[in-house]
Image (tube, grey):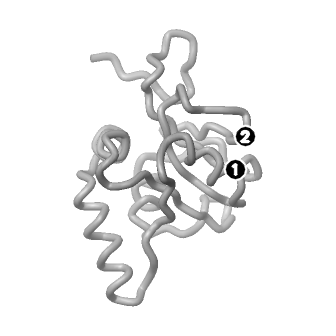
Amino acid sequence: MLFTPASAQPNELPNTIVLIAHPSVGTANVSRDTARAMFAMRQRTWPNGQAAQVYVLPNRDPVHGRFSKEQLGVYPHQLQLAWDRMVFSGMGQAPNRARDQADMPQQVASTPGALGYLEREYLDESVRVISME
């Protein structure tokens, strides 16, 4: 199977999952390790130092599962365990939740520093795409 980066567009399948961010985020791309750390809530800032607000879909959403496994290289339950540890230890908080993919761009666009993901077909001009290296 041919890997298509999130920045490629012309022949991309509509259900390709892309990282999205608030338009004010000054970062155009992040490494897979940085994205994994941000979604695991271990890194609370963008590489440029701006505070990050992470948004995820519900655990049972198939796009959440695909994003976790395909883009981050972790299983969804591993993310949930990391979030639970942070919350129960008092060392951090769980990410914000979007209700569904239609809600995700609205949440990200209205929250400075926000980071989320969705299938390309739900993408609109209110958010910017962040490439993952």
Q: Measured from the top left, where is residue 54 in percent x and y? A: 53, 60
For image coordinates 65% across by 48% down, the residue present is 106
Q: Position of residue 57 (x, y in %)?
A: 43, 51
Q: Secondary structure at mark 1?
A: helix
- Whether tag 2 and tag 1 are in contact, CB under 8 A, the answer is yes
Looking at the picture, how far across and down is residue 48, in whole percent?
67, 59
Residue 42 in the image: x percent, y percent?
43, 70
- Number of other residues with Cα within 10 Å of mark 1, as a class: few under 14, some 14 to 19, many 20 or more: many
Res 130 quadrant in image: top right
Nearer the observer, 21 or 35: 21
Give the left or right position of residue 102, taking residue 27 as reference.
Answer: left
In the rendered image, the vertical position of residue 93 relative to residue 119, given as above or below:
below
Which label belongs to residue 126? 2
Residue at image point 53% right, 42% down:
19
Please name the amino acid that badge 2 sits on: Ser
Q: Secondary structure at mark 2?
A: loop
The residue beneath circle 1 is 109
Instruction: Check the picture and name the quadrant holding the N terminus.
Output: top left
Q: Earlier in the sequence, mark 2 or mark 1?
A: 1
Q: Amino acid at mark 1?
A: Ala
